[in-house]
Image (spheres, rainbow, N blue to C red):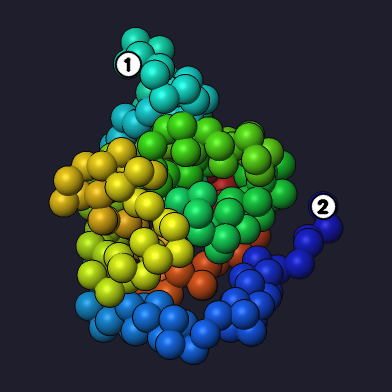
Amino acid sequence: MPRSTPLQTRLDNITTQTRSLVQPERLAITDNAVHDLLLSGIEDRILPVGAIAPSFDLPDAAATALSNASSANTRFVHSSDLLAIGPLIVLFFRGRWCPYCMTQLEAWQAAFSQVRAHGALLVAISPQLPRQNDFAVQHHGLTYPLLSDAGCRIADAFRVAYAVPEPLQEHYRSIMINLPFIHGDQGADTWRLPVPATFVIAPSGRILFAEAHADHRVRPDPYDVLTVLEDPANR
């Protein structure tokens, strides 16, 4: 299957367009936050290749599209069930408000036939409410599960969660990114996000691939990630 434009090229195009439209002083808020997050060492603390991945049991977007949906109607996705089928690719993303995240999820949708050809499954996890994930599924034509990780509990277990600093909180408020609404107002946990991270997990639970970036404008290409599954021993 022919490859489309590489994911990082598409992300760089978003960055170029953003820098041409947004005032430098506002760009500096994001750039400073990325710099500080990088200096925190979060990229070096994520669960490494060879570690055993935490199990998870998270609500899927599909069954909780309505804000008044009852918990009885919520469908939970169990990592153990997915790993019983084959390798599992796990994407941590910030939310549907992030154009970099949605471009990444679209790229994985384009590569989804190759995911299945490798005998693998794919899920994407964010702290936003299930109905927000459902909006993303519907608007971007995604056919793999988007799971809701309230308070970044599972992101914490994979060591990819962080607290959004106050200057960036104020910036998000000023551009109508209302994380308390998007996340369901979880108190102090409302202002927590995962760094964009990609893990590939073997059926045994062992992590085969692990990559996270403090800079949300950088993500691994799906086809590069999938090379780890070309070794039959990893399936």
Residue at the extreme front of the image, as rendered: 174
Eyeballing the image, is 195 above or below 231?
below
Q: Is residue 58 visible?
A: yes
- Three-letter code, disc 1: Ser
Say which of 223 and 63 sits in front: 63
- Three-letter code, disc 2: Met
Residue for point 16% across, 51% down: 188
Residue for point 35% across, 43% down: 181
Residue at the extreme top of the image, as rendered: 72
Say which of 153 and 55 sits in front: 153
**Residue 178 in the image: x percent, y percent?**
38, 52
**Residue 153 in the image: x percent, y percent?**
23, 44
Instruction: Report, in whole angstroms, how far the alpha carbon at label 2 lies from the one at label 1.
Output: 41 Å
Mark 2 vs 1, N-terminal side: 2
Disc 2 is placed on an element classified as loop
Residue 192 occupies quadrant? bottom left
Residue at the extreme bottom of the image, as rendered: 24
Residue 69 relative to residue 113: left or right? left
Residue at the extreme right of the image, as rendered: 2
Say which of 126 and 16 sits in front: 16
Eyeballing the image, is 90 above or below 15?
above
Q: Which residue is mark 2?
A: 1
| Circle 1 Cα neighbour tier, 10 Å, few/some/many (<14 / 14–19 / ≥20) | few
Say which of 206 and 14 sits in front: 14
Disc 1 is placed on an element classified as helix
Eyeballing the image, is 142 above or below 5?
above
Residue 156 relative to residue 81: left or right? left
Q: Is residue 82 visible?
A: no
Residue for point 25% across, 49% down: 190
**Residue 180 in the image: x percent, y percent?**
30, 47
Q: Check whether the beta carbons of the residues at disc 2 and disc 1 lie within 8 A of each other.
A: no
Q: Which residue is mark 1?
A: 71
